[in-house]
Image: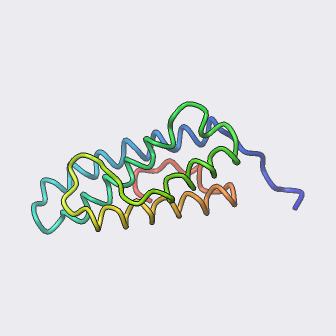
Amino acid sequence: MADKKDWDGDAVRKWLDARGIAARSEQVVAERGGRELQDDCDKASAEEMVCSLMSRKGVADSQAAFGAALAAILDRDEYIWRGVYNDTRFDRHVRSYARKLVKMAKTNTGFENVAHYQ
C-alpha cells in the first residue's frame, strides 16, 4: 500500500472541532422538536461528548494515542453528560460513536470530511 497516507493530527483536531460544533447544533434542533426527538438529542450529545474528550491536548497527535483514548472511552461502564434524556440510550450512542471513530482511526479515513451532516 504505497498510497497509505500519514496520520495528520491537525486534520483530526479540525474534524473533531467541526463535529463537536455540528453536534451542539443538532442538539438544539432536537430539543426544539420535543419529546419525539429526544433520542436524536441523546445521539448528538454522545457525539459531542466523544469529540470533546478526543479533542484534549495530545490525544490526536498520533494514531496510537488516539486509539488508546478511544479504548479508554469504550472501557467505561457508564457515561455522565449534561442534557441526557435516557442514560441507557445515551451510553449505547457513546459506544457506537466511539466504535465509528476507532474504524476511522484504523483506516485513517474520513477526517477530511468536515461537512455538517454525516
User: Which quadrant: the N terminus?
Assistant: bottom right
- Figure disc tally: 0
Vertical relation: 13 (above or below) 63: above
**Residue at the extreme left:** 34
> Closest to the observer: 56 or 104?
56
Determine whether 98 is above or below 56 in the image: below
- Along the viewing direction, whichever of 84 and 3 lies nearer the viewer: 84
State the quadrant of the C terminus: bottom left
Residue at image location 61% in from the left, 63% down from the top: 103
Quadrant housing residue 9:
top right
Q: Could you say which quadrant of the image residue 4 lies in?
A: bottom right
- Expressed as whole percent of the image width and height from the top left, the position of residue 88 reads 28, 67
Q: Please tell me which residue is depicted at 29% across the width and 48% down the height of the picture.
A: 81
Residue reaching furthest to the front? 77
Residue 76 position, x and y percent, is 45, 56
Residue sitting at x 20%, y 53%: 29
Q: Is residue 59 above or below residue 90?
A: above
- Relative to 104, is 53 on the left or the right? left
Q: Residue furthest top?
A: 57
* x 51%, y 43%: residue: 54
Relative horizontal placement of residue 46, taking residue 3 as reference (left or right):
left
Give coordinates of residue 95: x percent, y percent. 44, 63
Q: Position of residue 63 (x, y in %)?
A: 69, 47
